[in-house]
Image (cartoon, helix red, strand yellow):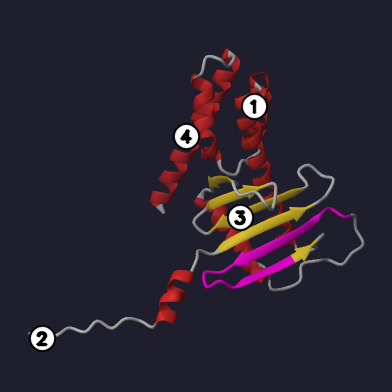
Amino acid sequence: MRTRWIVLPPLFALGALFAQAAPKLTFTKSFPGSVPAYVSVEVERSGALQYKESAQDDQPVTAQLPEPGTADLFSMAEKLDYFKSRLESGLKVANTGKKIFRYSSDDGTVTEQTFNYSLNPIAQQLLDRFEQIAESERAFIDLERAVRYDKLGVNDALAEVEALWLNKQLAAPQQFVPLLTRIATHESFMHLVRDRAARLKEEFAKSATVAASAAKSE
């Protein structure tokens, strides 16, 4: 009977394999006195999103960004050489908060830049995009809180979501669907509120269908 020998890779190679992680972009902004005073937006290349309003938050809001939006973020990061070069303008301008762009590669390498104000147009565009994501997540938090504790405030929270949607600034529409379903089907909410939630849910579903069809045709 012939003996078969199985050759295993060195332990350090196995360790490196398991240590690999998905590429990730992280944006943080610290601005004491503002509301919120701290935000963190973390996006993996898969589109997995985490949002925090405290560095110690161990239960972040999670969502899934659509692929086009995720691809845009990573494309801008690539154009900025994954934050290996200085972004701070050095100009004497008003303090608008300490901002950090961070890139974590799949091999664990981390590069980042800290700035208050940048003249780089791509950095400005990336900052705007992260700010939009943060605003979307705050709208989700506001709506969720209103659904739980302030039914009279749900219509105002829905109006906030709808305004972001109409301005094409709602980062992850599908994140809202469970809440919208709950509002639309629960008789404890006003008829006007239920209708608004149902309409938004339908619009988000149509958008997702169109995006899926476009992706298949590519």
Q: Residue at x 43, y 39 (%)?
A: 209
Query: Which of the two residues, 111 or 93, is positioned nearer the viewer here?
Result: 111
Rendered residue at 82%/60% (across/down): 116
Q: Residues within 10 Å of mark 2 (few under 14, many from 20)?
A: few
Say what amino acid the circle numbered 4 marks: Lys
Is 105 contained in the magenta span?
yes
Q: Which residue is mark 3?
A: 42
The residue sitting at 64% across, 67% down in the picture is: 79
**What number of labels is visible?**
4
Query: What residue span does the magenta drawing correspond to?
Result: 95-113
Q: Name the image quarter holding the C terminus.
A: bottom left
Q: CA distance from mark 4 to mark 2?
A: 62 Å
* Residue pointed to by mark 1: 146
| C-alpha distance separating marks 2 and 3 | 53 Å
**Which amino acid, mark 2?**
Arg
Q: Amino acid at mark 3?
A: Glu
Specify which label sits upstream in the sequence, 1 or 3: 3
Disc 4 secondary structure class? helix
